[in-house]
Image (spheres, rainbow, N blue to C red):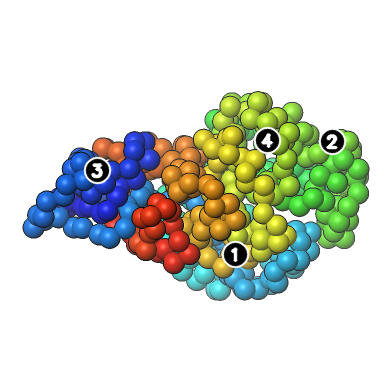
Amino acid sequence: MRRISANYIYPIDREPIKNGIIELDNSNRILKIIDTQGNLEESRNLEFYNGVIVPGFINSHCHLELSYLKNELPKGIGLPQFLSNIVRLKKEDNTNKILKSIELFDTKMRANGIVAVGDICNTTNTISVKIKSKIAYYNFIEVLGQGTNTFEVFEFNKNLYNTFRENNLQASITLHAPYSVSTEILSLIKHEAEISNTILSFHNQETESENQMFNEGTGELIEKLKSLGVKFDNFAVPGKNSSMTIANLLPKENNIVFVHNTFSNLNDIELINSKFENAFWCLCPSSNLYIENKLPKINLFLGSTERVVLGTDSLASNKSLSILDEMKVIRANYPEIKFETLLRWATINGAQALKMNSKFGTISVGKTPGLNLISDFDFTTMQIKDTSDVKVLA
């Protein structure tokens, strides 16, 4: 048994505990949480750390299989050109580099205190690593199919989904984005999600030209996709933005993670919240700055703070796969957001979005949430700093 303490423990489901003690069994399951009322007595078997102890982080949106593209794409080129570059680089034969990068950054994510990941998958490349990983993965099999053979596209992704499930990995079939799937394919995805009660996750309003495409049928995004050979022969311009369009095409009961939301406005947020009880808003601020040099209007999501989760996106658009780094970006740009709020977004909300909250998300008796120490913490403002670091304790 281990007994661990720090200046503060943030259980998430209760108030922070000053000089509290956590008792763990040999499998890192929490046996007891002791509130010392701030009066910690020395003990030979007690591990004390300077900083704050928090639950393991949840990375709600990642593309682990794109880790080999770290430092390969320029910053600030906008989403349409970014997608074009991804398509070009994917055509190159980098199998050995891809597999090595997957293994390396799975290990690095765990070292960064991440215990669970919502990971986007287009191939089977990550399976061998995930089978033995210390991280719990929920695998989103991503469908892209606009103006293509509906049955063949869906069957390909259904087979990919079955391969993940045959390896005892959690998975579901989801869309890449509202603009990249036909209504016929979206109907199949919706039906599959409803009968299997699975989770959906997709890129939402990541560029202004996405809304332009849905409102007017024009703009840089649709033109770039056409230049890549995507056919939009059957695309009927809805005359309203993508959130308003997709809201009528998704299952109402399933957990749905809307990712990026860089160009979402308050009307979009309120509409989705009203239509979907289990909608979550995933923020990937470092990626948004990397691609579009723009952040979502994060203050608009403060009225939905119970639904906000954090992701890293891929290393094609980020310098690290670190949830603490994402928290730092938000703190730097929105200093009014409290640490407790950021921490909730980084832990329990993500665990609920991925349906892993029975194990992760809070420091609670019976759970094995992982324990992270955040050091170099500002105890005056009770906030992280640019120099704050994370260390995995359990």
Residues at marks 3 and 2, CA–CA distance in whole angstroms:
49 Å
- Side of 312 relative to 111 (left or right): right
The vertical placement of 254 against 173, above or below, is above
The reply to whether dot 3 and dot 2 touch (C-beta < 8 Å) is no
- Side of 171 relative to 1 (left or right): right
For mark 3, give the secondary structure: strand
Residue 35 visible at all: yes
**Which residue is at a point 78% across and 34% down the rendered structure image?**
245
Residue 293: image quadrant is: bottom right
Residue type pointed to by label 1 = Asn
- Side of 347 relative to 1 (left or right): right
Name the residue that disc number 3 marks.
30
**Which residue is at a point 14% across and 55% down the rendered structure image?**
46
Residues at marks 1 and 4, CA–CA distance in whole angstroms:
25 Å
Residue type pointed to by label 4 = Ile
Of pointers 2 and 1, the one earlier in the residue sequence = 2
The reply to whether dot 1 and dot 4 touch (C-beta < 8 Å) is no
Look at discs 4 and 2 and give the one toward the viewer. 4
The reply to whether dot 1 and dot 3 touch (C-beta < 8 Å) is no
For mark 4, give the secondary structure: helix
Look at discs 1 and 4 and give the one toward the viewer. 4
Name the residue that disc number 4 marks.
269
Name the residue that disc number 2 marks.
240
Name the residue that disc number 1 marks.
318
Of pointers 4 and 3, the one earlier in the residue sequence = 3
Position of residue 170 measured from the top left corner of the image (x, y, whole percent)? 48, 43
Of pointers 1 and 3, the one earlier in the residue sequence = 3
**Which residue is at a point 17% across and 52% down the rendered structure image?**
2
Position of residue 144 measured from the top left corner of the image (x, y, whole percent)? 72, 49
The reply to whether dot 4 and dot 3 touch (C-beta < 8 Å) is no
Residue type pointed to by label 2 = Lys
For mark 2, give the secondary structure: loop
